[in-house]
Image: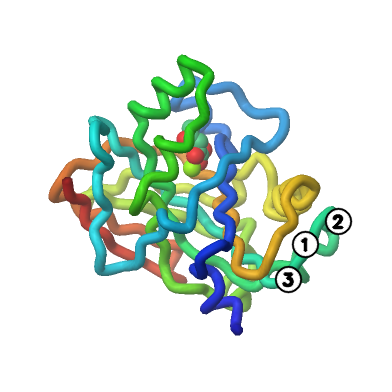
Amino acid sequence: MAVAAKFREIGRKIVCVGRNYGAHAAELGNPIPEKPILFLKPTSSYLSEGKSIKIPKGCSSLHHEVELGVVIERTGSNIPETAVPDYIGGYVLALDMTARDFQDEAKKKGQPWTLAKGFDTSCPVSSFIPKDKVPNPQNIQLWLKVNGATKQDGNTKDMIFSIPTLVAYISQFFTLEPGDVILTGTPSGVGPTNPGDTIQCGLSDVVTMQFTVSK
Ligand SMILES: CC(=O)CC(=O)C(=O)O
Ligand SMILES: [Mg+2]
């Protein structure tokens, strides 16, 4: 089956990278990481366009985080950085929707971010973008608007850890499989969304997507 169809199959991993843009780490008062910070989202968190992002029960601060997702097309572990391009099938535009109040509480208590990051609808994604549509994934604009107002406007050139570094690092710990998606972190400008809001975002002019937020 083509990687485009596989990336949302049950059982494929969503590996997320945190604090991969210095300005975003700074805006939340976090230090610049010395090595990639990783967490996982379950595949039940995927959401396609046309469906609503649902604020999880008890959350009072649901933040948007626009991110570039890398879609893996070959099984690999301990992948050398130089070989990473051979393992990438394409890309997706993604939102790492985050219950920031849950995350702040988890951080204070030294608990995992699973609830804050992995609830149903926390991973809205675009359709699959074949890799030839993104000739330089390390220099492309990521933007996001809430109700027409620009909130995030970043560029993947500002990643702390590049895509080859991330994929090589992750593959030392997790075997990467066709259809796995790696969310590469968000640029600065994250902020709250409320019921009734419309989120529009894009990867330059290669792909755009739109979601509404509901209770
Ligand atoms: C502070 C965070 O939620 C980390 C994260 O997901 C990111 O993209 O950075
Ligand atoms: Mg994120």
- Label 3 is placed on what type of residue? Arg
From the viewer's perspective, is 204 left or right of 2? left
First of labels 3, 1 by sequence position: 3
Please say if the residues under marks 1 and 2 sit with CB atoms less than 8 Å apart: yes
- Label 1 is placed on what type of residue? Val
How far is the residue under mark 1 from the one under mark 2? 7 Å
User: Where is residue 64 shown, x and y percent of the image?
Assistant: 35, 44
User: Where is residue 123 shown, x and y percent of the image?
Assistant: 41, 54
From the viewer's perspective, is 22 left or right of 118? right
Task: Find disc 1 in the rendering and name its residue.
Answer: 84
Q: Mark 3 CB in 8 Å range of ligand 2?
A: no
Give the numbered dot on residue 74: 3
* Residue at image location 38% in from the left, 58% down from the top: 124
* Residue at image location 21% in from the left, 56% down from the top: 212
Give the numbered dot on residue 80: 2
From the viewer's perspective, is 145 left or right of 96? left
**Residue 168 in view of the camera:** yes
How far is the residue under mark 3 from the one under mark 1? 10 Å
User: Where is residue 57 shown, x and y percent of the image?
Assistant: 24, 37
